[in-house]
Every structure is written in structure tokens, then in C-alpha cells.
Amino acid sequence: MNILLLGSGGRESALATSLAASPRCDTLYVAPGNGGTAAFATNVELDILDGPAIADFATDHDCELVVVGPEAPLVAGIADDVREAGIDCFGPGAAGARLEGSKDFSKQLMKKYDLPTAASETFTDEESAAAYVREQGAPIVVKADGLAAGKGVTVAVTQDEALSAVHDCFSGKFGDSGTTVVIEEMMHGPECSILAVTDGTTVLPMAPSQDHKRAREGDTGPNTGGMGAYSPVPIVTDGEYESMIDTVQRAVVGLHDEEIDYRGMLYAGFMLTDEGPKLLEFNVRFGDPETQAVLPRLQTDLVDVMLAASRRELHHITLDWSPQWAVTVVLASGGYPGSYETGYEITGIEDAAACEGVTVYHAGTKLEDGKVLTAGGRVLNVTALGDTFDQARDRAYEACDLIDFKDKYLRRDIGARAAKGRSAWED
Ligand code: AMP
Ligand code: GLY
């Protein structure tokens, strides 16, 4: 069958790689794709927020499955348009995508269905929000309600920081996203993500993973889209894992009770607190870069999984996993997440990809005159599989060192904290 995948990042490269590897996949279209997907799929220019245009393209090109990578098209209701055209779609419609599109909606669902999370209040005017911050004191977390490309959350150590975050939200820094603000208790502990495939009834959890959001080593510096990830997560206990799965399953029951037709990926971000795992957030799509560490370990055909989720037949599927460890390191443009230059030639990708257990996923790249050039902040994702966590880490860094481009930046400590064990989070 022909398949249309929407998106252009490292996550979409990993999705495209797994979809193209399926014997069921004939032509894979990626809109807009990147310099890597151009080599094994057909990149197409489409506005991924234009539902009717996507449904028309899929119809005209005999696509039987549409896979939505990023959150913005899901929040915009693209999956509804595709399904209305009679085409299977992996991803929730607009009603389900509110779980990511509105932090207030998400917190209300968590509260109503008694899912463990930080205590919080929601405000729609600055005065009441500021009064609440003064009453609660710092540390405290301020979140703009809507999509803000990962920049809408402030973990405020001081009251002044929290008040200025509240002011930023209400003064329009995040547009409409900030006119409603969620203020919540600060939690402590390591973070862990669970990606789960669901058809609205059956829930198939994928392996746990952890990303590294900060730009600099030692988890310092500004937040980024993610500088690296690994899977599974060695510091999670069996009890914590079971508790996280139970929470995800109860969330899907809650969505069903709310009469929300949720078919696709449910990503639950947790903090492993002393009182057990508590929800930080829900996302309605695969994580980036978590996907680049999770999918290479999945041995079940991804097209089978996605079609079964889209057709509410997930109870027929079991997910099989490689016992190997996966570590993903992001190679970024120097200056990211601030300003950076692009257009530099990248060399050594083939040598890196030839290393044992290594896959190089493109993110911010483009192909020009046969050369691969940098075209974004996060440029490449190098994933290595290994029999041990250390072997996967060593292989990933050996491959990273074979790749070169001007101003290349990477964190050298992906997985280093987890390799030391849980105590590394205690100081
Ligand atoms: P979110 O988009 O809600 O997941 O928040 C982004 C990041 O902010 C999370 O991955 C955490 O690192 C941090 N964060 C969010 N909420 C809290 C909280 N209640 N306590 C501590 N850190 C938080
Ligand atoms: N890696 C975090 C996210 O995809 O939201």
C-alpha cells in the first residue's frame, strides 16, 4: 500500500525508516520530509496544517494510511479530515489532541480520573494568577495552556521568576496559548516517558525511554527539543513501570468515557517522585528524540501496528522488542536552541551508518546537488544499539565522531547520569 507521513524531523525519519522497511509499504510519501527521507521515500510539498489538501493528496495517490508525526496538525484536526475521506489515519482527531493542545484540559482529565499528577490551579487573569503564586510561594511551575513549542513552561525557583512568567503569558508572549495559565506544584525526580499505542480500547505500551531536554552537559542550559535519549530506562523499578502503565490505561478509559475517539499514540511524560510516578504531561504523538531510541528496538511491523490502531483491531497485535539497549545522540548546529547558521556540508554520514548497530536519522538537513547540508537546529540523530547500555553509548559516540560539519555541537553525557544509577538524581 501507499502511505503518507506528515513531518520533517528526526522522529519522522525514524517513523519513515520503520514504515519503509515493512513489506506492506509500496510508495512512502513524506510531507515535507528532509534530506534523509529524500533518499528512500518521496518528499512532497504539502501544507501539513491543511486538512482538505492532505485528504485530497492521499486520495489522489491511493494512500491507504496517513501517519501524523507532529502535534500541530493533530491539534488542527487533520486526522478528522483524513478519516472523513475514508482513509485510515494514525493519530487522534481534534477532540483527543486537546490533551496536548490544552494543558488545562489535560489536567482536568487527570483530576477527573484520579491520575497521579502535581496539584494545580488554572487562571484566566493575571491578578488571580499572581495572587496564587504569592500565596503558594516558590518553587512553583507556570505553564501556558496552549502549544508553545516547548517554551511555555517555566520551572520557577523564585517567586519573582514565577511572577514574571505569569506576566509573560498574559502579555501575549505565547499568543493565545498564554491567555489561560496552569500553575502547579513543583515535583522532583528523574523523568521517564511511556509511549503507548492505542485504538481507544486496547493499550500497547512501548518500552520506556528518557530524553535530555537541556542544551548543555549536566542537564544545564536552556531547554531544547531534546539533545538525546535512551531506551529502556535502567533506573525504573518494576513497580514504577507497572504504575505508569496503569495510569496510561486509566487515561484511555477516561478518554473513552468522555466519548473521545482516540486512535494513535498516547505519550505520557512522568516524574518518578518519592510518592511514585506522577504525570507531567500528555502528548498526542511520538516523542522526539525518544522515537529514535524506541523504534529501532521494535521488531513488530510498524504498518501492522498503525493500521490495527486505526481500525480498532489492536487486540490482534503484540509488540516484540529486541533485548538490546538503544542510545540516541543529537548532533545540533552550534548556537541551538538560540540562533545558528545553516547550509554547511555534512560529511561522514555513511561511515557512521556503517558502524555496527548504528542508524543515522536525518532531522534538519537538505539535499542539494548531491550534497547533504545542515538546514536546522537539530541536524542529525545517531542511534546505536548495543548488548549493554555502555556498549550502546560507546557505539553512538564513536559514530558521532565520524560525522563532521561546521559548528557541530553535541552533548557528551547522554545516558551518563542513568548509568550511575538512581542516586545520581539525589543531589
Ligand atoms: P511539560 O511540557 O508540561 O512536560 O513541561 C516541560 C518540562 O518542564 C518537563 O519535562 C519537566 O522537566 C518540567 N516540568 C513540568 N512540570 C513540572 C513540575 N510540576 N515539576 C517539575 N518540573 C516540571
Ligand atoms: N522529547 C519530548 C517531546 O517529544 O515532547
Image (cartoon, rainbow, N blue to C red):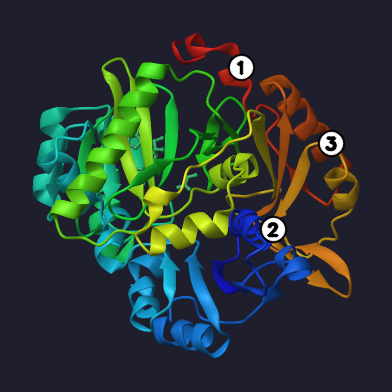
Q: Which residue is drawn at 83% across and 64% down?
A: 372
| Residue 121 position in % (x across, y down) | 13, 41
Residue corresponding to mark 1:
419
Indicate whether 348 appears above or below 77.
Answer: above
Disc 3 secondary structure class: loop
Kind of residue sitting beneath label 1? Ala
Indicate whether 169 appears above or below 140.
Answer: below
Res. 77 mark: none
Q: Which of marks 1 and 3 is nearer the N terminus?
A: 3
Residue corresponding to mark 2:
21
Kind of residue sitting beneath label 2? Ala
Tell whether 114 sits left or right of 427: left
Query: Quick one: 311 or 20, which is closer to the camera?
Result: 311
Indicate whether 104 appears above or below 275.
Answer: below
Q: Which of marks 1 and 3 is in front?
A: 3
Residue corresponding to mark 3:
356
| Residue 189 figure quarter | top left
Circle 2 residues within 10 Å: few <14, some 14–19, many ≥20: some
The Cα–Cα distance between marks 2 and 1, rounded to whole angstroms, is 32 Å
Circle 1 residues within 10 Å: few <14, some 14–19, many ≥20: some
Disc 2 secondary structure class: loop
Q: In which quadrant is the N terminus drawn?
A: bottom right
Query: Quick one: 260 or 9, which is closer to the camera?
Result: 260
Classify the position of ligand 1 by quadrant: top left, top right, bottom left or bottom right.
Answer: top left
